[in-house]
Amino acid sequence: MSIVVVGSMAFDTVKTPYGEVENALGGAATYFSLAGSYFCPVRVVAVIGDDFGDEHLELLQRHGVDTAGIERVEGPSFRWGGEYSLNLNERTTLFTELNVFEGFNPKLSPELRQSPFVFLANIDPELQMSVLKQVDNRELVACDTMNFWIEGKLDQLHALLDDIDVLVINDDEARQLAGTYNLVEAAKRIHQMGPTVLVIKRGEHGVLAFFQDEMFHAPGYPLKSVADPTGAGDTFAGGFFGYLAKHGEHGPGAIRRAVVVGSVMASFCVEKFSVDGLVDLDQREISMRYRAFQRLTDFGEF
Amino acid sequence: MSIVVVGSMAFDTVKTPYGEVENALGGAATYFSLAGSYFCPVRVVAVIGDDFGDEHLELLQRHGVDTAGIERVEGPSFRWGGEYSLNLNERTTLFTELNVFEGFNPKLSPELRQSPFVFLANIDPELQMSVLKQVDNRELVACDTMNFWIEGKLDQLHALLDDIDVLVINDDEARQLAGTYNLVEAAKRIHQMGPTVLVIKRGEHGVLAFFQDEMFHAPGYPLKSVADPTGAGDTFAGGFFGYLAKHGEHGPGAIRRAVVVGSVMASFCVEKFSVDGLVDLDQREISMRYRAFQRLTDFGEF
């Protein structure tokens, strides 16, 4: 089945202890699409400026991503700049220039409205809701959000959460949204807000998922070198949701495997700068990394 | 097979956001012994003061722990006081009174020298080495250490590491000892120092073990409530080493299961203050928690 993803496409300027890039391809929808493209057809809804080169669209198209929903408007694209600490666990935002993204008002074509799997990346919850209302044939709807919306548009976010199936956020966001530090208690409260599946991203410490009275944990893969954590969360979401859409199911077993697939894709993402770790992977590399996760976590009977 | 553990027995005064205890039973050897006692005979070598009540020794004995190697001397016992942050991830030491522990010079009886499994809890590496030299029948020797010795007695620590099999430390200690932030690289460097098995404790984020070119990860169990993290690392070590000693093996499969068993015991430890979470557990509770770890981490084929 195909996925529609709505979110940002951007140029990122990133500095880590291991190097730096300037105006490199980035944005949640970009990372999501590339990661998801290895599992199912992905259609992107986004806005870009007139500075957005065709080579970036061609990169997506080469991965089978449908770019017809990307609107190009006059003006510069969304730009973000950030710098990571020595241990890569903290980052400082140096600048955020919304530019053409400020006027983003996503409209789905009749074809896109029929996509059964819908991922609403981190944008204003009012826009996320407006997209959701355009969807005609939903089977599974997931969203991401961030502290900015939890603080500034909580009512609108609650209205959205009440209407979606899967929430994918990081641990601090889950704690803030639920108003409690304990993640088990936070999950219980967030389930009551609407989402039946809650996926909590914990950076290098992996992912914790809560669904149908079950918990599942996947670690971050211990890598020999990490270049740039930017986009790891969106990449996770693309692999996770792509796997579910590929198999057209979202029962407990599929959720568990999808969390590992998302973690696999995130582990490729952080090994290089920008989207370089997600370009031209082959299925053999992906299934080998999946098996590496199996070896990493496998233990037998008591 | 039996274990000899050498380490501290103490009284802890601990404050967490969920309560506080004053002069409660603590110390690395205490937590280790109680956790290990569920799997194999444990013999403790430690020093206590004349303020150390018989009820504490009886508690250990009730768990089958051999307390003959505990030396009682005049003066007050080791006391430690600490306070945890709201998220339990940071702790401030309020006081450390070594007291009788300052003159600790462990001597093993002829019987204790024959124990094939030896755990050297966190004490001066010169004392750890002096114990190791007394051991006659070693099959597996493990040790813990801390930043204080990495900074102050590095040469003596290196001499010890060269002669032990298993090192159990936390992530910051591993980074400091190896001089690198990346844990995969740190593990490589630490293997070169001597230990063939490296077990890195990461608090609520679980445990990462490196052995025979393999990696294994076990998560911290997501608990509904955590009362007091004190002793979790020593409890982990007791369960981990106890499982290995019980089965008399330390191949890759046993290491993996032992890491999970250690994590199981640590999860009981943190649910209550002091050693209360480790007292009078039954085997059914332990195997149920082990199965809960299986459910938490289980996923199938790609």
Image (cartoon, coloured by chain):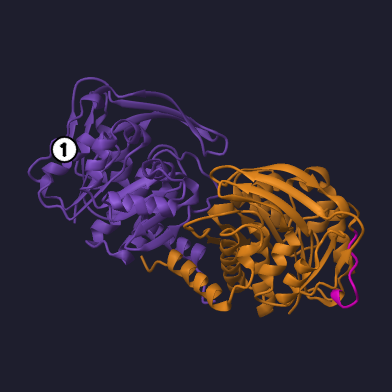
Chain colours: A orange, B purple
Magenta span main SS = loop
**What residue sits 45% from the left and 64% below the top?**
A297
Position above or below: B240 against B93: below
**What residue sits 27% from the left and 29% below the top?**
B53
How many numbered circles are shown?
A: 1
Magenta highlight on residue A110: yes
The answer, for residue B7, to whether it is visible in the render is no
**What residue sits 70% from the left and 50% below the top?**
A13
Magenta highlight on residue A250: no
**Dot 1, how many residues are within 10 Å of its Cα: few (below 14), some (14-19), or many (20+)?**
some
Tell me where residue A210 appears, x and y as whole percent.
62, 60
Q: On the rendered structure, is B42 left or right of A154?
A: left
Tell me where residue A208 appears, x and y as whole percent.
58, 58
| A212 and B174: which is toward the camera | B174
Q: On the rendered structure, is B63 left or right of B266?
A: left
Would you name the residue on which mark 1 appears? B130
**What residue sits 35% from the left and 63% below the top?**
B213
| B70 and A292: which is toward the camera | A292
Instruction: Identify which amino acid the numbered label 1 is placed on.
Output: Ser
The N terminus of chain A lies in which quarter of the figure? bottom right
Tell me where residue B271 appears, x and y as whole percent.
47, 45
Q: Which residue lies furthest to the left in this view?
A: B110
The answer, for residue B184, to whether it is visible in the render is yes
Under circle 1, the secondary element is helix
| A93 and A144: which is toward the camera | A93
Position above or below: B32 against B49: below
Q: Mark 1 lies on which chain?
A: B
The C terminus of chain A lies in which quarter of the figure? bottom left
Tell me where residue B185 appears, x and y as whole percent.
41, 53
Q: Give the range drawn in magenta.
A: A105-112
